Image (cartoon, helix red, strand yellow):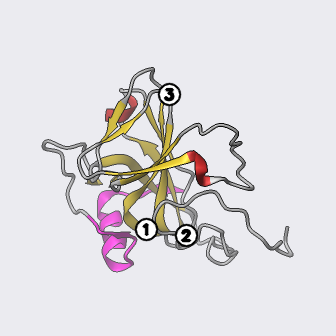
Amino acid sequence: MSILPDHEIRRLAVEQEMIAPFSETLKQEGVISHGLSSFGYDSRVAPEFKIFTNPGGVLIDPKNFDDSCLVTKVSEDAIVLPANSFALARTVEYFKIPDDILVICLGKSSYARCGIIVNVTPLEPGWEGHVTLEFSNTTPTDALIYPNEGACQFLFFRGESACEVTYAMRGGKYQGQTGITLPRIKKTIDAAE
């Protein structure tokens, strides 16, 4: 397995629409950087956030998610992420991952150095959609998140060959997601499970 360099990411973004919209260069001046980097792609966070609150009596259950614990905030300027809190957002970019590529995401150091952790599970071969981003403010103070600026970096790894069963082939529950996607449980059981 090898990591893809900038020219290969660019080729896949253009020829296979792997990243759309695609920013050819790393935008840095006056913003948290985003766009094509040497061995990755720095993605932007969209201006809508779902911030967890504590309305009392709500239990977070990934099998039966109650969205009454979320408050939606939209801003083109900045979002305040309260101290010791958690929010969901999504990438501006829509991704279409080729069948021989696995993508790993890491948070931007500009946020990590402020105690803001960005988490994303791997993007599997054959998956497509907007990526749901998870922001954790680990500090005892409120923090700002800047929409339409860099939030995380995606690293693209090519396997020695395409996998036998892609995320799309097995009917992954997050396939084709748009917007901020909340936890889902697949309703049918595959014969292979």
Using the numbered discs, state the Cα–Cα distance from disc 3 to disc 2 in whole angstroms: 32 Å
Please identify, in this view, whether the residue under mark 3 or under mark 2 is nearer the observer.
3
Query: Is 191 left, or right, of 48 in this rendering?
Result: right
Cβ–Cβ under 8 Å for marks 2 and 1: yes
Circle 3 residue: 84
Dot placed on the residue nearer the N-terminal end, 3 or 1: 3
Q: Earlier in the sequence, mark 2 or mark 1?
A: 1
Residue at the image position 59 percent from the left and 72 percent from the top: 162
x, y percentage for residue 145? 33, 40
In the rendered structure, the answer to whether residue 176 lies left or right of residue 78 reads right
| Image spot of residue 115 (x, y percent) | 42, 27
Q: Residues within 10 Å of mark 2 (few under 14, many from 20)?
A: many
Give SS at disc 1: strand
Q: Give the residue type that dot 1 points to.
A: Phe
Q: Quadrant of residue 25?
A: bottom left
Amino acid type, residue under disc 3 in the picture: Asn
| 7 to 171, vertically: above or below | above
Say whether disc 3 or disc 2 marks the residue closer to the N-terminus.
Answer: 3
Outermost residue toward the left in this view: 29
Query: Marks 2 and 1, how far apart in space?
Result: 8 Å
> Who's the residue at 40% across and 22% down the image?
141
Please tell me which residue lies in front, 10 or 52: 52
* Residue 121, percent from left and from top: 57, 51
Identify the residue under disc 1.
95
Q: Which mark is residue 127?
A: 2
Q: Judging from the image, what secondary structure is the residue with disc 2 in?
A: loop
Residue 180 in picture, x, y percent from top left: 48, 60
Direction top: furthest residue: 140
Is 18 in the magenta? Answer: yes
Q: Amino acid at mark 2?
A: Trp
Which one is in front, 127 or 79? 79
Residue bounds of the magenta highlight = 1-22
